[in-house]
Image: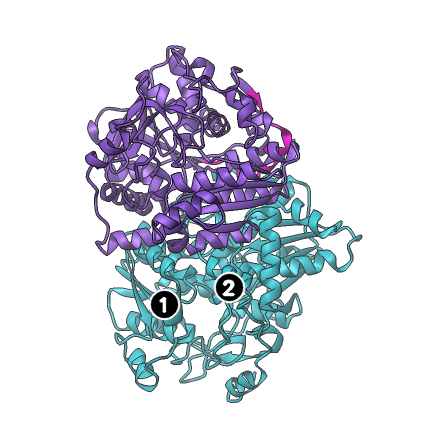
Chain colours: A purple, B cyan
Amino acid sequence: MLSKKIILRDDEIPTQWYNIVPDIPNGLQPPLDPETKEPMGPEKLAVVFPMSLLEQEMSGERYIDIPEEIREIYSIWRPTPLVRADKLEKALNTKAKIYYKYEGASPVGSHKPNSAIAQAYYNKKEGVKRLATETGAGQWGSALSFATNKFGLECKVYMVRISFDQKPYRKAMMHTYGAEIIASPSSETAFGRSVLEKDPDTPGSLGIAISEALEDAAGREDTKYALGSVLNHVIHHQTVVGLEAKKQMEIVGDYPDIVIGCCGGGSNFAGIAAPYIADYLAGKKVRFVGVEPASCPTLTKGVYTYDFGDVAQLTPLLSMYTLGHDFIPPGIHAGGLRYHAMSPIVSALVREKIIEPISVRQLECFEAGVLFARTEGIIPAPESNHAIRAAIIEATKDKNEPKTILFNLSGHGLLDLGAYEQFFSGNLKNYDYPAEAVAEATKNLPKI
Amino acid sequence: MLSKKIILRDDEIPTQWYNIVPDIPNGLQPPLDPETKEPMGPEKLAVVFPMSLLEQEMSGERYIDIPEEIREIYSIWRPTPLVRADKLEKALNTKAKIYYKYEGASPVGSHKPNSAIAQAYYNKKEGVKRLATETGAGQWGSALSFATNKFGLECKVYMVRISFDQKPYRKAMMHTYGAEIIASPSSETAFGRSVLEKDPDTPGSLGIAISEALEDAAGREDTKYALGSVLNHVIHHQTVVGLEAKKQMEIVGDYPDIVIGCCGGGSNFAGIAAPYIADYLAGKKVRFVGVEPASCPTLTKGVYTYDFGDVAQLTPLLSMYTLGHDFIPPGIHAGGLRYHAMSPIVSALVREKIIEPISVRQLECFEAGVLFARTEGIIPAPESNHAIRAAIIEATKDKNEPKTILFNLSGHGLLDLGAYEQFFSGNLKNYDYPAEAVAEATKNLPKI
């Protein structure tokens, strides 16, 4: 019998998200008000987030019901396939079994709509008319455009200028879903204007774009803000990935020894890992490997402390591994991994030594992606290549040791083919660990 | 219970392709040798095609077994989902039920690998080392690159120059799968050089690129030729689409009143329609609508006669609806539909009035595609927009008449987002039926 893919029926889409927060050993440090340095309640954040998402953000409940309206939209592409990478295994000549969960199956090509749909839903329900957000490589902006369109909300995307100029297809995708896109820094916000005044030719950064979107949302009665990673509620939403994967692995009678994902803000990795971490905490033997780019080594070279999520210091202080909110990572093509910090949830799990962070370099990641395309057929997103690279490292460490590897193939690379072309023509390079830039950006951070 | 998609298991991939040729009323006229004007046997074609594909081309058997190796590779993306377009139905305020078969689920984003995998398999089996082919918009070239990579064959793609220049992502995709790509006309073939000599700045055409690939294959012992549509064996391979769709429609207890597909060479439409045409010939009531662009109106304005498949007149004479092998269609963005002729199978079914051809215009197709993206979530290929447009016409003709529509969503548009951006900025236009160009290109064709 053919069984390359393990597919679930639409009605097997999970009915609850898993909230790992109450299960984290030694807990999660609360967000702090930057002015008072006291724990921040939901009231102040209610300017930019709807109450139901803030409740999820602060929730101590292990499970959160997924509304039927959300499951119905999920069913456009969920449940996603779990696939046995048998051709990759063969090419590696390994006894390891490799499975991947294919989140590139969504209409926008990544895992991002898992949270975008939920965020659009709750905003709509609370009467919000318009969402403002930022996007780097364009994955999140595309996902939120798709999601707001589904619920009849307006959407304004502040897109990091360098991506805005280099990724016209991403812009076109957001336009197709009816969103409005502007290059960031823009002249539409006070913060954007202040950045442009100092440096009119700046390529922009995710931290700047977040500041602009927050300013937009805070300044308009009809508008809230949406973030595509980092926050607790985003990670809860992404657990549909791991919950489905567990069901699918059960169907083939297998269980992972190692769960792997790439880490930018942390949501795709935590999404697949969290339900397995619950098992680990109950005594099951599993390893968790979070993979970041060597050029933006938040978990492997950053400090664990309180920092801002954006450049303009508009967010609360979050307890995170961080390279400093002023750190601008080198221009690698895995734009989704170019973020200075890591979600509090993933950071706390690294602190507890439950997640093992590793960093890998750009060229090896593209090599891994090409090998994956030539064996498994799917061309992966540059971000997902980091997970593939780590899966290959684990599978070839000791080729004769039978083990089961599961990783999150968080997206396809069809809108990143320009980066592959640059790789083939030898125009991509590795970046060394930017030690001095990190030292500079972290020197004034508080210690915890 | 949620049931947006109807999914089959990997082991439900069809085990046989359906060959409609023996069922066509009044039969199919045989290919003719251009020199003798006599029916052409397989021997002369064996220079460019492997014998097993020629046997399928000439076969009178209703069913052809699908080798397990092919089913195994199909299982990377097949069975593809059948999806109820309930959100589109609602937007149209129609009582019609609309289903689509989603062939964009393949790694290259279209139905083309259904035949590419089969062609690479049979060539490999007969000891061929290298395949030469042409590609217009890039869908077929991508599919054959993917397929040859799977079987360890070399692949040379002659890509119509205007697409080569305008679609760098397509090139990158083919490179990722390890293929060699050259802009056509090229200086690597005698025919290419002769075209370049007359017009060094020519944008190229599919007919020219076919001539170059044929010359390449005929001139090298280790090389055969592969064509992505038109021929009988290609259409047999594509019937997996319709065979799966029938199973899936049975699962929901529905049966189409109308089956719709876009028509370039005819393979995606015949692929979904053929298994239903078998039912029609057995007395079932179904309509079949083949949709072509108004700017390349092969079935609606062409003549039914013997013509060449390429510009250099290297192919046999095929009995087809044609606009003349010298006809160069206007530069619409549905590059896969810019072909001067139509497969003999589809042509004969139009001749028999089993298939109803209609033509639709570019702007209305993009409008339909945007509506589809904003309701169903998936951004369709410009070619597939033609099928969507026709589905909308049928669904809104008489909104209160309950009927069931099934169409082939032959591909996604993620590598065509540039065309969508042009549509939004008002830079796309409709083209009138190019009556004079057609008259000129058809004036010397033989009559049958």
Q: Nearer the viewer, residue A310 or B337?
A: A310
**What's the chain of the residue with tag 1?**
B
Residue carrying label 2: B422
Q: Which residues are magenta?
A: A64-81
Q: Is residue A106 visible?
A: no
Q: Judge whether residue A86 is colored magenta.
A: no
**How many residues crowd around disc 1 within 10 Å: few (fewer than 14), some, or many (20 or more)?**
few
The amino acid on which the numbered mark 2 sits, given as a three-letter code, is Gln
Q: Is residue B359 above or below residue B100?
A: below
Please tell me whether mark 2 sits on a helix, a strand or a loop: helix
Q: Position of residue A106 (x, y in %)?
A: 49, 42
Residue carrying label 1: B165
Q: Position of residue A421 (x, y in %)?
A: 29, 55
Q: Is residue A246 above or below residue A92?
A: above
Q: Position of residue B193 (x, y in %)?
A: 28, 80
Q: Is residue A253 above or below residue B224?
A: above
Q: Position of residue B58 (x, y in %)?
A: 46, 66
Residue B263 lies in quadrant = bottom right
